[in-house]
Image (cartoon, rainbow, N blue to C red):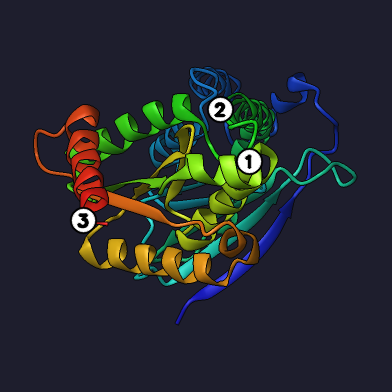
Amino acid sequence: METVRTSALYSDNEENIYDIFKSHDLISFEDKAVCLSVLQESFDLEKMLNNFSLLIKKYIRGFSLIFQSAQGSFDHNRTSNHLYSDSYNLSLSSTAERVGTLTYQSNKPLTATENKQLIEFHSLLIPCLRQALQLSELNKLIFKDHLTKVSNRAYYTESIQRAIEQSNRTHQGLALIVLDADDFKEINDTFGHIKGDNALIEFAKVLTEAVRSSDSVFRIGGDEFTLILQPGDHISISKVLNRIATVIEKNMLLKECNFSCSAGFSQWEVGDTAKSMFTRADKALYNKKLLK
């Protein structure tokens, strides 16, 4: 049976980094300095929290970590087999906005000493975490398509490379779907460019609605979009494509424009690159269009 304990973390002082170093704490001044240096090595959310999990393992013990916030989330060694789950609401003070929730999963309960140690580590993490989340928000704006508000081509290039690297490490399933509108020029010529833009906006919403939270949607140019499914296999690909077709049928604006799309996909294979995956998916898309 899972035991869940939720604790709130508050620091008595707002953002004074010097208040972290207190003599009566369980973690020494020297160790705190080392840990803070490690946390500041990268302000990428995933890298920072991965470094944090390694510090916790070194100074306390190993945990599965789950971080959740409005700006981003992170899982490290998450499993459903752990018996105990302890969650902390991370905030700089009782009046400050919550940064997020950090959950530790393990097979034995936290001791009072471990709980205090974690809270001391959180005082190191929170200021760094806030900067990482702010940077994440800024990157989302930079990598967002101005029309449809989904991610743009630049972010697709970065994301597919990262997804392939992860598959190379874990052999986790990965799928790439390439889609574009059928005869989109006719929509612009018949209904006007404003209606055409609105159709693209609605199509992006359809794609976003069709995928899972672990998947990503990108507009890579004109009426062409890509989806990264991770994990991705034939079943998940089929489900996503069926949902897309169903939602398009129900969308009034897209029906008015006689909007339809074609899709091709590829699945990750050992030795794949971003180019090889896209080439296979794009070729499958082209073949589908020939059959229409």
Of badges 3 and 1, the one in the foreground is 3
- The residue that label 2 is drawn on is 143
Between marks 3 and 2 in the image, the one whose residue lies nearer the viewer: 3
Q: Residues within 10 Å of mark 1 (few under 14, many from 20)?
A: some
Whether tag 3 and tag 1 are in contact, CB under 8 A, the answer is no
Where does the image place residue 208, in percent across and percent down from the top left? 53, 54
Which mark's residue is nearer the viewer, 1 or 2? 1
Q: Secondary structure at mark 1?
A: helix
Q: Which residue is mark 1?
A: 197
Question: Can the viewer see residue 114 in this picture?
Answer: no
Q: Is residue 30 rendered to the left or right of residue 178? A: right
Q: Nearer the viewer, residue 111 or 163?
A: 163
Q: Residue at x 9, y 33 (%)?
A: 271
Residue assigned mark 3: 291
Determine if residue 288 is in view.
Answer: yes
Q: Position of residue 240 (x, y in %)?
A: 38, 63
**Nearest the camera: 267 or 219?**
219
Residue farthest to the right, as pictured: 95
Q: Residues within 10 Å of mark 2 (few under 14, many from 20)?
A: some
